[in-house]
Image (spheres, rainbow, N blue to C red):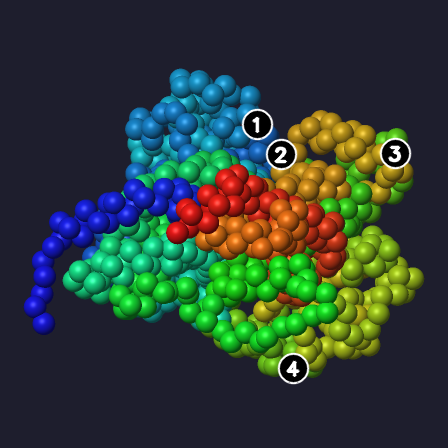
């Protein structure tokens, strides 16, 4: 067959066809813009949140380096530098000098250190506000939080006095020295949460001079390997090379958690994004496909004539695709800009879910956002016009003349009635004259309604007050973040002391104050506990992060005991609350596996409640031996005590088993019992009492003691509701608009194509009023079908969506109000739009409309 080469003609035909279909072009551009907006905003929010989350994890660990080594000699540092697997340019050295002992630092650890440039770069939590690293002997850089504590202004050149204790043979002495420094820089932490450990930066010159006459703390080194593959193996090999080594070395848990992620976890994390992408693609496809399908069916005779004069099927396909490409060139850039702007509005809103990050944590941008948005939007358009292009290319010139859409070619049964044709039956039959168009419109509009119902179900099912109840043991709590990391033996004050407790009890509006103690205990490794460990499944991630690949059972066997957190509770009433709200002190929501809570027996003492595991070998009634240190080290001996198990919770993970005992038992066994938190009940006026306690907290100058109240959690839960509502309803609005555009486009083309038919019906006796009634009924039936879909598939979707996005302490509630609103909107649109279109096409007389069709 001879090939023809008439590209210019095809281009001219495409241009003319494009200019002729103005209404199609407008609706198509709107459809592509909306689809691109959805893709761009989704990728903007998704990428920003992913980067913010990874950075937040690095902030919690303190560095983005792969590994950290502490207490290294110069020989060992040289070995690391020369190792072929280590990226030499990433090595950062932190020279630790001493822990500062200013009176203001009595409740936290503040270390004097020397950071080199690489260490500062990898310290992702540090954001330098002004200044640079120290160079001279008397220069220093400090966090603003520490400057505020010692009343030093945030001003370069300000004088700073710091107290350093003397150390002899690695042991602190009572001697202290005061050093004067000049402030050459200050910084803030990117995380808004309290940090229990602060580093203050001084110069290499000060370190060298100080080291000549004083002992200094061990040096630590952080660095990256050339890649993060097989980190554990590289880490182990490096440890072997620097032996003998007795210091502490750790792998950044961020990278280990990535490597330990299972396929199931990946699917679980990625599935929601995939579903959203499919949803956007489907909603865009339904509209764009319908637009092109209607357009080619309307112009099919024109395409048949083109085929008659020699246009090939490929060229006809190209004709459709060229028009689609032209629409994309206009619409996609607009959608990218609007989508990115919308995404930047959503990012800080969604970021409120990530507690502790300030606004700078979300300043992420990547050109790939636009690349993927363009690809997905264009793929949606190409998929949408694929079938219409195929129809055009495959139709024969003869068929094109009489083409009326294959979906209409159905065998119709002969119908008869006693009183003639019924308008409502005619209206229902008209809906499915073109089944494909009808189904596309129904799916498109139903989709937006189902999403609206699902988002409404998630919002209406969350209960801020209930969430607050679940997060608190009382109306107000005072907690501090140092109980797990610092014992305060060297300090004169504890974060929560008896004077503070006494003052709180004397406040008006306070009905009760309960104490919660916490300490590290050792459980003798024998009997049921040994069986518990031997049968306990241990996550691979946990082994890698915290046990460096060692077998936990072997560790326990060698030591003869397991370390565990023990919580001392001042009343059995508090324990009852804890059994219901156990997620406060454990890593997952719990249930009681064995036994029950007896408040009276717990108050009498001698009982323990264990925060254990599913399938636990330890049961209620068993006896467990506890062992507490008499002093600071194991060598100073223990205090032994046996407890009877009252109940076992399913609330722990791996070996983070928690024990709950009575306050008196706790104080009798622990040499220095520290209060981790206070639980305060009020007479009802929570806000007033909260303000008074905040003032007291300021008076006692405890920077790491924080006041929590039900009001805080209620507000946080309401904020979460707002975010879901704003983001969810924005998506509903855009997808809903796509559905409405689809319906409007279908109604316009449907009624326009039936212009002659309506004129003929009027000519044989149907009144205009009857014709209007038929058109309104057609829209009404659309509304009925969409409502049925909402009641069936919509109801299932609300339950499924609720379980996927389930917020803490939410209870499923069917969104009756949202269903009524969606039904009213659907019926309003389906009734009014067809009527408006009909009025526009029926302005001419019957004769003129029949002649125009001819």
Crowd tier of the residue under label 3, counting other residues whose Cα lies within 10 Å: few below 14, some 14–19, many 20 or above: some
First in sequence, mark 3 or 4: give its number: 3
Distance between the Cα atoms at labels 3 and 2? Answer: 25 Å
Work out whether residue 315 can be spotted: yes
List x then y, in percent, for residue 491.
63, 39
- Residue 101 vertical position relative to residue 301 in the rendered view, above or below: above
Of badges 1 and 3, the one in the foreground is 3
Distance between the Cα atoms at labels 1 and 3? Answer: 31 Å
Name the residue tied to disc 3. 509
First in sequence, mark 3 or 2: give its number: 3
Distance between the Cα atoms at labels 1 and 4? Answer: 50 Å
Q: Nearer the viewer, residue 51 or 732?
A: 732
Name the residue tied to disc 4. 531
List x then y, in percent, for residue 381.
35, 55
List x then y, in percent, for residue 642.
78, 70
- Residue 786 vertical position relative to residue 342 in the rendered view, above or below: below
Q: Which quarter of the picture shows residue 811?
A: bottom right
Instruction: Answer whether labels 1 and 3 touch (C-beta < 8 Å).
Output: no
Instruction: Answer whether labels 2 and 1 touch (C-beta < 8 Å).
Output: yes
Name the residue tied to disc 2. 703
In the picture, which quadrant includes the N terminus?
Answer: bottom left
Is 453 positioned to the left or the right of 73 in the image?
Answer: right
First in sequence, mark 1 or 3: give its number: 1
List x then y, in percent, for residue 709.
74, 40
SS under mark 4: helix
First in sequence, mark 1 or 4: give its number: 1
Q: Which mark is residue 149?
A: 1
């Amino acid at each position: 067959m001879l090939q023809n080469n008439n590209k210019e003609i095809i281009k001219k035909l495409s241009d003319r066809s494009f200019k002729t279909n103005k209404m199609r072009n407008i609706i198509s551009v709107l459809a592509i813009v909306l689809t691109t907006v959805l893709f761009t905003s989704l990728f903007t929010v998704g990428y920003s949140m992913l980067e913010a989350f990874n950075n937040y994890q690095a902030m919690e660990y303190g560095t983005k380096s792969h590994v950290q080594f502490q207490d290294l000699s110069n020989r060992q540092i040289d070995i690391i530098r020369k190792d072929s697997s280590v990226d030499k340019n990433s090595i950062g050295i932190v020279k630790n000098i001493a822990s500062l002992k200013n009176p203001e630092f009595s409740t936290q650890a503040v270390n004097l250190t020397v950071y080199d440039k690489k260490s500062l770069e990898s310290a992702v939590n540090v954001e330098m506000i002004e200044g640079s690293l120290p160079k001279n002997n008397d220069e220093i850089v400090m966090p603003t939080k520490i400057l505020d504590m010692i009343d030093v202004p945030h001003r370069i050149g300000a004088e700073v006095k710091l107290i350093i204790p003397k150390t002899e043979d690695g042991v602190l002495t009572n001697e202290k020295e005061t050093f004067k420094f000049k402030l050459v820089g200050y910084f803030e932490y990117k995380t808004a949460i309290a940090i229990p450990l602060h580093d203050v930066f001084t110069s290499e010159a000060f370190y060298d001079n100080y080291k000549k006459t004083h002992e200094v703390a061990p040096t630590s080194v952080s660095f990256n390997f050339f890649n993060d593959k097989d980190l554990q193996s590289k880490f182990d090999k490096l440890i072997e090379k620097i032996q003998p080594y007795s210091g502490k070395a750790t792998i950044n848990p961020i990278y280990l958690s990535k490597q330990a992620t299972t396929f199931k976890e990946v699917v679980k994390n990625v599935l929601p994004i995939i579903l959203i992408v499919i949803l956007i693609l489907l909603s865009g496809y339904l509209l764009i496909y319908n637009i092109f399908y209607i357009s080619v069916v309307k112009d099919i005779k024109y395409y048949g004539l083109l085929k008659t004069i020699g246009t090939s099927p490929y060229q006809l396909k190209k004709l459709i695709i060229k028009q689609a490409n032209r629409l994309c060139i206009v619409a996609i850039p607009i959608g990218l800009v609007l989508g990115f702007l919308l995404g930047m509005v959503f990012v800080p809103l969604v970021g409120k879910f990530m507690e502790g990050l300030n606004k700078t944590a979300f300043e992420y941008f990547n050109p790939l956002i636009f690349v993927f948005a363009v690809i997905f939007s264009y793929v949606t358009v190409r998929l949408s016009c694929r079938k219409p292009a195929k129809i055009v290319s495959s139709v024969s010139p003869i068929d094109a003349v009489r083409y009326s859409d294959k979906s209409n070619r159905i065998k119709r049964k002969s119908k008869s009635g006693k009183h003639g044709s019924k308008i409502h039956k005619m209206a229902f039959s008209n809906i499915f004259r073109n089944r494909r168009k009808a189904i596309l419109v129904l799916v498109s509009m139903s989709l937006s309604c189902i999403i609206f119902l699902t988002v409404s179900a998630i919002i209406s099912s969350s209960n801020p007050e209930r969430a607050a109840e679940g997060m608190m043991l009382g109306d107000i709590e005072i907690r501090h973040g140092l109980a797990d990391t610092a014992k305060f033996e060297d300090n004169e004050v504890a974060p929560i002391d008896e004077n503070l407790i006494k003052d709180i009890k004397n406040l008006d509006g306070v009905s009760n104050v309960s104490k919660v103690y916490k300490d590290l205990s050792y459980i003798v490794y024998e009997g049921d506990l040994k069986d518990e460990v031997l049968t306990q499944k241990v996550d691979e991630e946990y082994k890698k992060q915290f046990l460096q690949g060692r077998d936990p059972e072997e560790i326990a066997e060698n030591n003869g005991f397991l370390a565990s957190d023990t919580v001392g509770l001042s009343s059995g009433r508090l324990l009852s609350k804890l059994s219901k709200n156990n997620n406060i002190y454990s890593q997952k929501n719990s249930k009681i596996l064995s036994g029950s809570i007896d408040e009276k027996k717990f108050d009498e003492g001698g009982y323990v409640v264990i925060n254990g595991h599913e399938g636990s070998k330890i049961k209620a009634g068993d006896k467990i031996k506890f062992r507490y240190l008499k002093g600071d080290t194991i060598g100073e001996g223990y205090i032994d005590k046996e407890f009877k198990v009252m109940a076992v919770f399913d609330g722990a993970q791996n070996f983070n088993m928690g024990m709950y005992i009575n306050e008196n038992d706790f104080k009798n066994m622990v040499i220095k019992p520290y209060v981790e938190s206070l639980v305060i009940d009020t007479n009802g006026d929570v806000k007033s009492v909260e303000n008074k306690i905040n003032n007291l907290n300021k008076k006692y100058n405890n920077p790491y003691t924080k006041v929590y109240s039900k009001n805080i959690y209620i507000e946080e839960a309401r904020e979460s509701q707002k975010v879901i509502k704003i983001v969810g309803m924005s998506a509903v609005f855009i997808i809903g608009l796509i559905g409405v555009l689809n319906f409007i486009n279908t109604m316009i083309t449907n009624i326009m194509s039936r212009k002659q038919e309506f004129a003929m019906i009027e000519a044989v006796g149907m009144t205009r009023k009857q014709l209007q009634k038929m058109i309104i009924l057609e829209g009404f039936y659309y509304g009925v079908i969409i409502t049925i879909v909402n009641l069936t598939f919509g109801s299932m979707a609300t339950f499924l969506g609720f379980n996927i996005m389930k917020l803490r302490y939410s209870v499923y509630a069917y969104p009756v109000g949202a269903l009524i609103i969606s039904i009213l909107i659907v019926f309003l649109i389906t009734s009014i739009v067809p009527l408006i279109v009909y009025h526009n096409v029926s302005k001419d007389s019957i004769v003129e409309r029949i002649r125009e069709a001819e």
